[in-house]
Each structure stands twice: as C-alpha cells, then as structure tokens.
Amino acid sequence: MTANLNLTRSNQRWMKLRTTVQLSGAISSTIQKPKPQLKREDSFLKRFSTRQINENQETLDTGDDGDYGSCSEESETLRELRRRKRRHRKKQPLTVVNPDENFYFYWLFLVSVSVLYNLWTLIVRQSFPEFQEMAATFWFSCDSITDLVFILDIVVQFRTGYLEQGLMVYDSKKLARHYVKSRPFILDLVALVPLQLLQIQIGPNPMLRFPRFIKIYRVYDYYYMVESRTVYPNLWRVVNLIHILLILAHWFGCFYFLLSQAEGFKGDWVYPYRPGEYATFSRKYLGSLYWSTLTLTTIGDLPTPETNAE
C-alpha cells in the first residue's frame, strides 16, 4: 500500500513538471519574435546606390577588416543620405536656364548670329560708304535688334544654372553672384558701350560699334556645344575653318581698299580706281576681295580680272 501511494505521488509530480515545461515553452515562443535576418552590404557601393532601401531594414557594414558595424548607426547614415537627396532633388524653376537643355543651345545660336552679323557687316559698311547709304534704315534696324539680343543675353546669363559639387544650382542669389563675379559679366558690359551715339556728331561711322566684337566668346561657346552634340564633328570643324578663312579674306579686302583710298589710289599695288565699272560698289568689293584672296594664298603673277565674274 505504501509503495503504491509513493508511485502515485511521483507520477503526479512528473505530470505537473511536464505540464509546466510545456506551458513555459508555449509562452516563450509566443512572446519572443524571431530576429530579422541581417543583410550584409558593401558600405561603399551602398552609399552610391540609387535603389530604394526600406527604412526598417537593418544592414551590416562589411569593411575590409571583416568587422561588422552597428545596425542603428548604419540606418541613421542611410536616412541622412535620403534626406540630402530629397533636399537637392528640387524641381527646376521655369525661370532658370539649364545649360544642357535645347533652349540654351538655340539661344546661343541666336547670339552667335548677332555677333557674326557685326563681324561681317561693320567693316564693309565702313570701307564702302555707299553700301551703308543704300539701306540705312535696314542697317539701323538690324543694329538695334542685335543690341537687344545682347541685352537679353545678360538676363539669360543671370538665370543660367551651373554645377557645384556635381549638383545643379537653381538659387537666384547664387546664380546672380556667380555671374557678377565672372569675367563674362565684365565683357558683356563693355560690349554694350554705346559708342555709336557719337555718330550723331560725326556722321555715319559703323565701326564705332566695334565693342560688339567682344561678344565673340559666345560664338566659341556655341561652337564647342555643337561639336559635342553633332554626329559629324570633323565636318563641323572643316566648316568652321572655311568660315574663318572667308572672314579673314573679307576683312583684308576691306583693309586693302581703305589703304588704297588713303594713298589716293596711286601706285602699282593699290586698287585700280577709275570711272566706269571700277567705281561701282560690286567691282570695288570683289576687286578688293580678289586681291586679299590672292595675297593669302600667295599665288601671285596672275592677270588682272576685267569683269566681276573673273
């Protein structure tokens, strides 16, 4: 009887112990959540990655020495990087010009045409007054339009963005400060000096607009921009070289006629000025251009042309 009673009590204690263990295991499994799997990423590549990273995802920074960084510090770093991106990822204002967009490309083309207009016409209008008098109103209108383009170019450059540490700057105060402190600002102001107003006192003198030649730096900007965009850069370089040779011949021809006029058209090398065909504007210009081309190419010993076609 005593042995049976002891066996029954031990069985009861064993059953209670097993029940207690089972309950504690169930409770612990319910309370404790599995830790999320940590994902290792290279810290260098991760800082320059553009993919979205979940803020709740914990990462380990794997360095070259194999040590693991703190998950909380890494998450703070990622959040700081995202905040910086959001600050700099501002929408471009409509009044700010991006130098990589088409508007800036077409605007440079318009400015370049205005600069080349002055380079080609002022010297010939100065050398041959009859060419200036043939269309005085037309020349005055063209001069005014080009001056307006140069004034608007200053406004455009005040609103042209620039890169700072790899990011495009759109802030109005920074853009204005950057342009005012640059050399183009001084060149643009000098180019618009109104010396042409002296014509009111001394008469027609187109070369008084010579400060406009300073704007030629914008032509170079357009040249390099086209060279970087075109699929035929060598063809563009050849066209540019031909244009330079033509404008040099144009200027030397006009200088040749001015020197001939200053010498009174006396001598063997001067322009053969005489009444008739040689006194017309077309013959004077073509004859001067022929002399300058002949001189630049160093051909020489050719018979003097008698007609405009020759």
Image: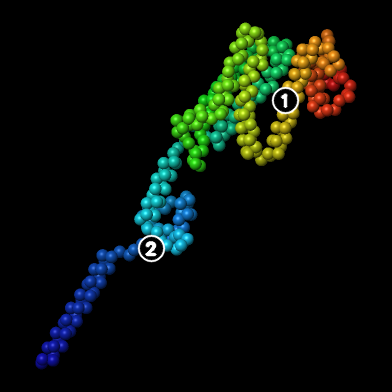
User: Residue 263: which numbered mark, if any?
Assistant: none
Picture layout, residue 208 above or below residue 19: above
Quadrant position of the C terminus in the picture: top right
Task: Name the mark nearer the viewer: 1 or 2.
Answer: 1
Q: Is residue 16 left or right of residue 188?
A: left
State the residue in front, 78 or 202: 202
Disc 2 is placed on an element classified as loop
Q: Residue furthest left?
A: 1
Instruction: Give the x, y percent position of residue 251.
Output: 73, 22
Instruction: Give the x, y percent position of residue 307.
Output: 85, 18
User: Residue 247: which numbered mark, if any?
Assistant: 1
Instruction: Give the x, y percent position of residue 115.
Output: 63, 24
Residue at which label 2 appears: 37
Q: Residues within 10 Å of mark 2 (few under 14, many from 20)?
A: few
Q: Residue at x 37, y 51 (%)?
A: 76
Disc 1 is placed on an element classified as helix
Q: Is residue 48 left or right of residue 256?
A: left
Residue type at mark 2: give it: Gln
